[in-house]
Image (cartoon, rainbow, N blue to C red):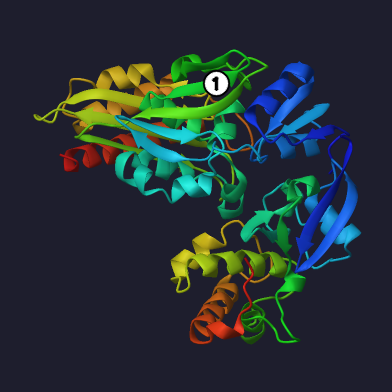
Amino acid sequence: MIPAVFDYHAPESLDDALALLRQYGPEAKILSGGHSLLPMMKLRLVEPEHVIDINGLPDLSYVRIEGDVIKIGGLTREAEIEQSDVIRSHAPIIHDTCVMIGDPQVRNRGTIGGNLAHGDAGNDHPATMLALGARIVATGPNGTRTIEVDDFFVGFYTTALDPDEILTEIQVPVPPARSGGTYLKLERKVGDYATAGIAVQLTIDAQGRCVTAGIGLTNVAAVPLRATRAQRRLVGTELLEADIIEAARFASEDARPSSDLRGPEAYKRGVIKTITQRAIGIAAGRARKNQ
Amino acid sequence: MKSKEITVTVNGDTYTQDVPSRLLLVHWIRENLALTGTHIGCDTSNCGACTVLLDGKSVKSCTVLAVQANGKSVTTIEGMATGGEMHPLQQGFHEEHGLQCGFCTPGMIMRAAELLADNPDPSEDEIRWGISGNLCRCTGYVNIVKAIRFAAKKMREQPEAVEATA
């Protein structure tokens, strides 16, 4: 399978990349890791006239803590995030997410920026960023702006990025003490998109009561979904079995999965319920240990 | 540009060629360089038969554009043997019967090359996880895992016998 003909650009600075985006507008697509875009181009599901390869841009690949924020450059490869000590010690839910993305070769190319900017509900980081309450930094011709993750995924393959903007950074509030989270994904085989993927990030207080709960769902709707009712069910509780079971049920009811090759809708709702229950259990256990 | 001149080092040899922008790296390797050891299995970034090393990292060359390799170095299965001697990974696949039809084998070996560079003494689980991006329809993976363990041991015992592939 071969993509349609396109003009290829390999800018060496962010300014040049933005100028190209400005010039070619809706006819251009950004090429980052390429493992969502190139397969679509090979299938001719998308035929951009201009491809702007941003892999040569400097200073966009990093994982660092500044104060109480983890900052991740948009061009950071999944493999690098997977191996990051900063991530493993401060937000292991992100590590749990990375290892479920594709496979080792895919993770050598795929970038977290692309995973989010593609706007695909089937990509894994969106649910986790919902659970973490992350912020997306977009850089355009007029400078940078910060978009709350809940405002970022607006529709089917559509994000809040303007056509002349590039996703340059992800900001994750460092989870406080007594926090725990995990990402669980059921897939038919390694490398598959999720039958259902669940991200849970919880914080408890000194009495063991849930103070905050973030639950994001992968591939169960046209957009990455926040399980708001499930979250509310957990806050204020001691995360006992009955709380977890009912929250998981709410998540499965509020999801909007489609029947497809991964299974009928009823099956997927069952998967969501089971996996959400497990994920909340794991997150709660980690929060209790993380005093 | 609809085409671009690229300079890429492949298995130690440097090539400068004008290529269409949409040319996939796997097609450039196979058709322009006649290095047909790299195979196209699924063409959808699932099977891993197209795996090569790009600046030492294993990548699926069906999902990389040739123009993206500009200025970089590529290692294919043809670059593994040195001085007529099989690389320990090739020896392992020979000794442990790690292949039947051989179609997945170059991709397995290139992936294993990076795996062992990162982790010279992997457990069976680490090997299985490490090759999870490579599919084999023939063997059931058991002998592939043994082949990689054989190579890991050989490479630990005789590091000077291995040319740097990064």
- Can residue A102 be seen here? The reply is yes
Task: Look at the picture and state if A176 lies above or below B108.
Answer: above
> Where in the figure is residue A202, as x and y percent of width and height?
27, 30
Chain where mark 1 sits: A
- Quadrant of the snapshot with the C terminus of chain A: top left
Q: Which residue is depicted at the point 35% across and 44% down?
A: A86
Left or right for A152, reference A8: left
> Where in the figure is residue B145, as x and y percent of width and height?
55, 73
Q: Which residue is depicted at the point 23% across and 26% down?
A: A243
- Quadrant of the snapshot with the N terminus of chain A: top right
> Where in the figure is residue A71, as x and y percent of width and height?
42, 32
> Where in the figure is residue A74, as x and y percent of width and height?
54, 33
Tally the numbered discs. 1
Of residues B10 and B102, the one drawn nearer to the viewer in this rendering: B10
Task: Look at the picture and state if A185 lies above or below A256.
Answer: below
Left or right for A118, reference B127: right
Q: Quadrant of residue B10?
A: bottom right
Mark 1 lies on a secondary structure that is strand
Left or right for A237, reference B18: left
**Kind of residue sitting beneath label 1:** Ala
Q: Quadrant of residue A248?
A: top left
Q: Which residue is depicted at the point 63% across and 37% down?
A: A57
Question: Which residue carries the number 1 mark?
Answer: A138
Are there few (<14), some (14-19), or many (20+) residues within 10 Å of tag 1? many
Task: Look at the picture and state if A12 lies above or below A144.
Answer: below
